[in-house]
Image: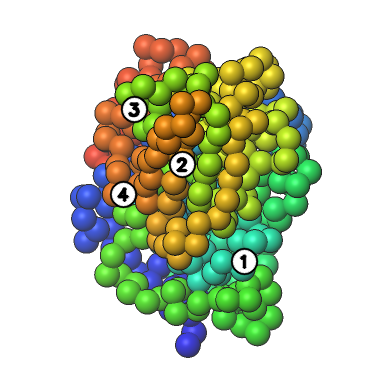
Amino acid sequence: MDYTKTLARWATGVDGFVIGDDVLAKSAEFVLDWAGAALAGSVRPQAGMLYGIVRENAPPIGPCTILNGSLDRTSELWAAFQNGFNGHIMEMDDVHRGAVFHPGTVVIPATLAVGQKLGVDGRKFLTSIAVGYEVGIRVGTAAGATHYTRWHTTGTCATFGACAAVGYLLGLTPEQMAWALGNAGSQAAGLWQFLDDGAMTKPLHSGKAAMNGLLAALAAKNGFTGPDNILEGRKGFLAATSLDAKPSALTEGLGERWQLMDVSIKPYASCRHSHPQIDVALEISRKDGFRPEEVSAVKIRTYRTAKDVAGGFGRYPKASHEAKFDSAYCVATALARGKVHIEDFEASNIESATDVKKLWEKTTISIDESLEAEYPAKWGAVIEARMDDRRVLTASTLYAKGDPEKPVTVNELSEKFKDLADGVLPTDELDALADRILGIAETEDIDTIFPT
């Protein structure tokens, strides 16, 4: 089957006026969620390192907003890159369980950049986001588990999503969209080695995926051809990056249900694989008679990928990005403090958290085969906290807070946005900005959302 061409025909034929208001509202919620993460990320040291390069190479003025304290403007390619980079720094951006990747921090920056340049209305902008999520998530699902063992899906599969979203806004023909997807696939990249080395690489993947997907769509609009069977070809994306690819996932049920409705929102600033464990640890911390200083051992059971990706580095974390991928640290923080905040992942706070370190030293992680059998449809965790008096406090879950089965409310999402953006933009502007984002569907020109 010509999977790439089928996706291309679908993505170019979507009519924004037949999409339900629930899908558009969900798209707007993801924009708000991403905006908070991007604003928070913009003041981190990593953002400054890359923004110095952008300032040296990008136009100092342009139609596209960079989400930072100054709401700077530049060209679409560089805005997409920096916004995609900033949105992934804090590990607070949305995630899809089945595809195991973060669509928002790639799809939305690319779409926002082109949408601002073209002056599109809010309904078309939100529709393009839904199209991008659909394509990216389907590629991620089709790539299978073996892809994720070496390839960072947010850098690889999301490139297709950014490309499809932008291609929809540009009005590409089905042939052009297939070319664009082909060249997006040829640029898709992102390896997990940074985890072993404790490097800063991860948000570079999302920034480049946004930029590369956008570039592929712009090139196709100008007639630049690409392979039109990049997904299913014998030397294509799935053949090159997966041993258990499921090509049928690319088109099965296409048009019946929007994949975006199954995307999760993150309440904690750590790897999503740690979130079920955090939820369970918080539940234990609220049990009658629980005192963190009386814990003698903590046993975490979860699925294999959670241990492989977020199982820590064999030592107490020293840096923010290490703590975010150390589930034992996250669980110990939840048990010790009864909460997990962004500040808990600051390097200085990690080092001084002696109460957390004591619990971290008592915590072990193992694979539970029953939870492994449920993954990736369900991301489960079981925790047993053994107390000094030999009591064992236990809790478990198959879903994390923010999953569709345990959704955050719009009010909770707005509070998350304000917590993240506070101090980056003036506090008195945040409520108005949140309202404008949530009301994008009624906006005639999305450029008015982020005023200069």
Of circles 1 and 2, the one toward us is 2
The CA distance from mark 4 to mark 1 is 25 Å
Mark 2 element type: strand
Q: Is residue 313 visible?
A: yes
In the rendered structure, the answer to whether residue 407 lies left or right of residue 328 reads left
N-term-proximal mark, 3 vs 4:
3
Residue type beneath disc 4: Pro
Residue sitting nearer the eye, 166 or 279: 279
Q: Determine which residue is flagged by label 3.
A: 287
Residue occupying the point 66% across, 41% down: 312
Contact, mark 2 vs mark 3 (Cβ under 8 Å): no
Residue 104 in the image: state x and y as whole percent: 47, 46
Q: Does the image show residue 334?
A: no
Looking at marks 1 and 3 on the same chain, the residue that comes earlier in the sequence is marked by 1
Task: Say whether disc 2 or disc 3 marks the residue closer to the N-terminus.
Answer: 3
Local secondary structure at mark 1: helix
Query: For the residues carrying marks 3 and 4, which lies nearer the camera in this image?
Result: 3
- Identify the residue at image location x=44%, y=46%: 382
Image marks 1 and 2: residues in contact by CB distance under 8 Å = no
Does label 2 or label 4 sit earlier along the sequence?
A: 2
User: Which residue corresponds to mark 1?
Assistant: 147
**Residue furthest to the front:** 389
Q: Which residue is mark 4?
A: 404
Point out residue 52 in the picture as x, y percentages from the top left corner: 74, 29
Instruction: Tell me where residue 128 sits by quadrant.
Output: bottom left
Looking at the image, residue 361 sits to the left or right of residue 419; the answer is: right
The residue pinned by badge 2 equals 383
Q: Distance of mark 1 from mark 3, alpha carbons?
A: 40 Å
